[in-house]
Each structure stands twice: as structure tokens, then as C-alpha cells.
């Protein structure tokens, strides 16, 4: 007899608590194999395909494309252990809760994988389940049809009506962000009704409850008429990559006491050196790769800027390797891919890796590993046709080098006025890790290397 198993959105790593369904790869009634990708989701880090660890027939899908689900919410159900050709009509429409032997019956059809390329050797050991026989135990909630209205959250300051008692037992919340939001707002989650699967409390439920509580307090002395028409204007949800960028930049501005210094440099010799290298044959060298080589040499002289701050321990952690991030604009927004071990790479290797990551960013094919682990960021905002900027540090890094456009400008060269290729360089740094003298020394060394690339030949 077939068993219906529920596959939930797995923990995608990197502290991610939710993901948006971008595209379903299977439909109800389709036969899926073990570890076959069934849905494409977008997290705050990247787009990933999620494989199903069960093999069988898809009997239900949860969430339409564009829906945001928290980690642990049901994704789909699969009927396993029966003939595939029987289709969904031959199996129950929903998983049987408390069927303790369901997993053991299909252990040969379970992989334990949660992402392509990851997984375990087999299913976790089955534990004996102890059923509670308390008469006060509430029955399992009935499934809510898609057309049913979302439940109304109850604010902390308004007592729950008799028909909607407070939660008895553990509060159905998965996301730590939701718990923190409720705690900061003084909201008792036991008085909130969840609109997620099986009553799961989502961020929207908490925000609605807090807003309702604020309205209730404001209207207590003298009721204020509430406008029935929402303010005009387009509303763009802060989620996915855009939401992650907003959260990270806000955290950077809140935690890091940053400062910026800048200098103009004559890049004529650097441009000539690149042209000579490319004219000599072999793989072409990008300007970004030469700037990256200058960065890693400067960080070797000023290691304070290749560090992070452990606020809990009140310590500066100087990092041994340089993993160089670079800002890349994509159709999905700004991302910062990371070139690992940039200090050990040649100009040719850096050019190749920059090209690979840039193309992957354009195709939305960057993995979470490609977007994490950076220790220093190189931001070439000159591609946007601007000369200078005061960028926000990519938290938890300690510094970012900005490069403006390289354009012909009047410049005093060897005592005479000449037209030279000039660039503005800026350094935004965490003032906790170093003072202005160190930051100025780093930026001056970078400018010297840009003006005279032969300076790098003296670096051991």
C-alpha cells in the first residue's frame, strides 16, 4: 500500500529562514525520482533547485509561484511505496500524521538530500514515537482551502475572543526573525493566529498584530477615522536579493562606524602596462584583475583592513587569507560574488574567475558559496560613468576600495601640464579596526601602484 510523505522546505544554510517559490518543476500527478529537483526557489543569497528526497507520485503542492515560505513549511506530498502508474487518485490526498512506520516502509526510496550536491548517506534512524493521550489535546486543524480568507491576528493589547483561545503548548513559529520582531514589539505570540500552513505564524501575522495594537492604543482616547483608500504609489516588496541587500546595508550602517578617504591618481602607466601585456599574446588581462592584484599586495602591507570585528568578544579578528568580493549589478539587483584565495592567484587566474562569476551572476546561477566568505570588497563603480562614491561596507568586512571612471584630465606630469588618464580612488573603512593613518597609507600605496605599476615588482 502506498504511503504519502510530506516534504518540507529544508534548511538551505547560511542562516536563511525563508525562500520564495520561483518555478515549480513538477505538477500534481507527476512521477518523481529520488533526488529529482522539484522546485526552484530564490533565497536572499541565490537561486537554487530543491530536490525531493522521496521517489513516487506527487499528490499535492503547497504555494503558488511568487509565494514566500518559511523553512519547515510543507512544499509537497509524495505517494511512495505503491505503483507509480496508479496516479494520485490511488493514494490518500494528504499525508497520514502519526504514521510512524511510513518512513521505514520507504527507506530505500529516501536519500536525505536537501540540495543538489549535498545530502546524507541515508535516512535518520527511526525513533519510537510516544503518543500523548491527554484529553485536553486539541484535534488537528482542518486544511484551509486556498480561497478562504487569511485568519485575523489578535494584538497583544486586545484580549483574544472566547472563540479564538490562546495557543496551548508550543507556539507555531519557525523563523527567529519573527520571534525577535514580536519580542521587540512586546507582542505575546500565544495571542496571534498564524496564516501559514497548519497555523504557522509568519512575519506578516506579527506585523499585522503590532499594527492593530498601535491603532487600538491610538484610538482609545479619541477614535480617529481611518482612511479607506491606501496611499497612492507603487509598492515594491523588500524580499529576495533586494530584501537581503536592504537588511545587510542597514546593519552595516547601524553597527560600523565607517569613514572615507579618497585620492586622484594618474592611471596612464597602468593602462599602458595592461595594453602591453595583452599585446604580448596569451589570455587577455582585465583591468579589474590588475586592480585586484594591487589590492592584495596593499592588504599584505596593511593587514588591519583584511579583518572583521567580533562585537561579542570585543576583539578584532585579522584574517590570514584574502577572499576578494567585487560588486556586480545584475537584473535581480546588486550582488557581491567572492573570488576565493585572491592573494594566491595570478592576473590571468583572477581575470578568468572574475569572468566566470560575472557570467554566473547575469544568469542568476551563483551559489550561496559564491556569495559568502568575503574579507575585502573591490567596487568598480566607474562602469556607471561616475567619478567618486562613498560606498557602504559589506558587513562584516572592514573596508572597501572604490574605483571611479578613468578619463582624460589635465594633470601636471614631470613638471608640465599634460592630458593624462586620471582615476579617483576611495577607501571606506571601519574606524574600529584602524585609524586614518593606516587607511591613508593603504590608499596611498594603491595610488602609487596605479601610477607606477613597477612598484609591484619590489613586493616580495
Image (tube, helix red, strand yellow):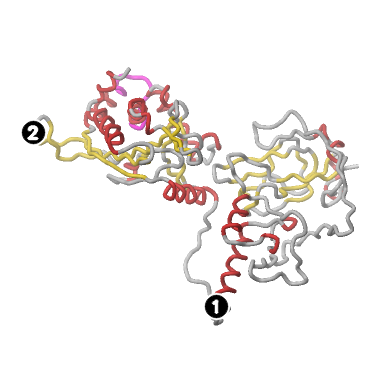
Q: Earlier in the sequence, mark 2 or mark 1?
A: 1
Whole-percent x, y for residue 266 in the image: 21, 34
The local crowd at label 2, few if under 14, some if 14 to 19, many if 20 or more residues have their Cα within 10 Å, is: few
Q: Is disc 1 placed on a helix, strand or loop?
A: loop
Write the start and end of the magenta stretch as one range.
277-289
291 versus 243 height, above or below: above
Whole-percent x, y for residue 215 in the image: 57, 73
The residue carrying mark 1 is: 226
Q: What residue is drawn where x is 48% and y is 64%?
A: 234
Q: What residue is drawn where x is 46% and y is 39%?
A: 314
In the drawing, does residue 29 fall left or right of residue 275? Answer: right
Relative depth, front residue between 255 and 337: 255
Whole-percent x, y for residue 182 in the image: 61, 58
The residue carrying mark 2 is: 416
24 versus 113 height, above or below: below
Q: Is disc 2 placed on a helix, strand or loop?
A: strand
In the drawing, does residue 396 fall left or right of residue 79? Answer: left
> Real-space Cα distance between discs 2 and 1?
70 Å
Picture quadrant of residue 35: top right
Q: In the rendered image, is residue 258 in sight?
A: yes
In the drawing, does residue 240 fall left or right of residue 314? Answer: right
Amino acid at each position: 500500500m502506498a504511503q504519502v510523505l510530506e516534504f518540507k522546505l529544508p534548511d538551505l544554510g547560511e542562516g536563511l529562514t525563508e525562500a520564495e517559490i520561483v518555478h515549480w518543476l513538477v505538477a500534481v500527478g507527476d512521477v518523481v525520482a529520488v533526488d529529482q529537483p522539484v522546485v526552484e526557489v530564490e533565497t536572499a543569497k541565490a537561486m537554487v533547485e530543491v530536490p525531493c528526497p522521496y521517489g513516487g507520485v506527487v499528490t499535492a503542492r503547497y504555494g503558488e509561484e511568487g509565494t514566500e515560505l518559511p523553512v519547515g513549511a510543507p512544499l509537497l506530498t509524495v505517494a511512495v511505496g505503491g505503483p507509480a502508474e496508479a496516479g494520485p487518485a490511488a493514494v490518500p490526498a494528504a499525508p497520514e500524521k502519526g504514521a510512524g512506520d511510513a518512513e521505514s516502509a520507504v527507506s530505500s526510496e529516501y536519500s536525505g538530500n536537501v540540495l543538489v550536491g549535498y545530502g546524507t548517506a541515508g535516512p535518520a534512524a527511526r525513533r519510537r514515537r510516544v503518543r500523548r493521550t491527554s484529553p485536553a489535546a486539541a484535534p488537528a486543524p482542518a486544511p484551509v482551502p486556498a480561497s478562504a480568507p487569511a485568519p485575523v491576528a489578535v494584538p497583544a493589547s486586545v484580549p483574544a475572543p472566547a472563540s479564538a483561545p490562546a495557543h496551548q503548548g508550543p507556539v507555531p513559529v519557525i523563523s527567529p526573525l519573527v520571534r525577535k520582531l514580536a519580542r521587540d514589539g512586546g507582542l505575546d505570540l500565544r495571542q496571534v493566529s498564524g496564516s501559514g500552513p497548519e497555523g504557522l505564524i509568519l512575519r506578516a501575522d506579527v506585523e499585522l498584530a503590532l499594527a492593530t495594537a498601535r491603532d487600538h492604543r491610538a484610538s482609545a482616547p479619541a477614535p480617529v477615522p481611518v482612511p479607506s483608500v491606501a496611499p497612492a504609489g507603487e509598492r515594491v516588496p523588500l524580499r529576495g536579493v533586494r530584501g537581503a541587500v536592504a537588511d545587510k546595508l542597514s546593519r552595516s550602517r547601524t553597527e560600523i562606524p565607517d569613514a572615507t578617504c579618497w585620492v586622484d591618481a594618474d592611471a596612464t602607466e597602468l593602462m599602458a602596462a595592461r595594453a602591453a601585456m595583452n599585446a604580448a599574446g596569451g589570455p587577455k588581462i582585465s583591468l579589474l584583475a590588475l586592480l585586484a592584484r594591487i589590492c592584495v599586495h596593499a592588504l599584505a602591507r596593511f593587514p588591519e583592513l583584511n579583518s572583521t570585528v567580533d562585537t561579542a568578544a570585543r576583539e578584532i579578528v585579522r584574517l590570514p587569507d584574502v577572499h576578494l568580493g567585487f560588486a556586480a549589478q545584475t537584473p535581480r539587483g546588486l550582488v557581491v560574488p567572492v573570488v576565493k584565495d585572491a592573494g594566491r592567484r595570478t592576473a590571468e587566474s583572477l581575470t578568468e574567475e572574475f569572468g566566470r562569476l560575472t557570467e554566473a551572476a547575469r544568469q542568476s546561477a551563483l551559489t550561496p558559496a559564491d556569495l559568502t566568505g568575503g574579507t575585502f570588497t573591490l567596487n568598480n563603480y566607474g562602469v556607471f560613468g561616475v567619478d567618486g562614491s562613498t560606498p557602504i561596507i559589506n558587513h562584516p568586512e572592514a573596508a572597501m576600495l572604490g574605483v571611479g571612471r578613468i578619463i582624460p584630465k589635465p594633470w601636471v606630469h614631470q613638471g608640465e601640464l599634460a592630458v593624462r588618464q586620471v582615476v579617483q580612488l576611495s577607501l571606506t573603512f571601519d574606524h574600529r579596526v584602524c585609524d586614518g593613518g593606516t587607511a591613508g597609507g593603504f590608499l596611498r600605496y594603491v595610488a602609487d601602484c596605479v601610477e607606477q605599476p613597477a612598484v609591484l615588482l619590489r613586493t616580495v
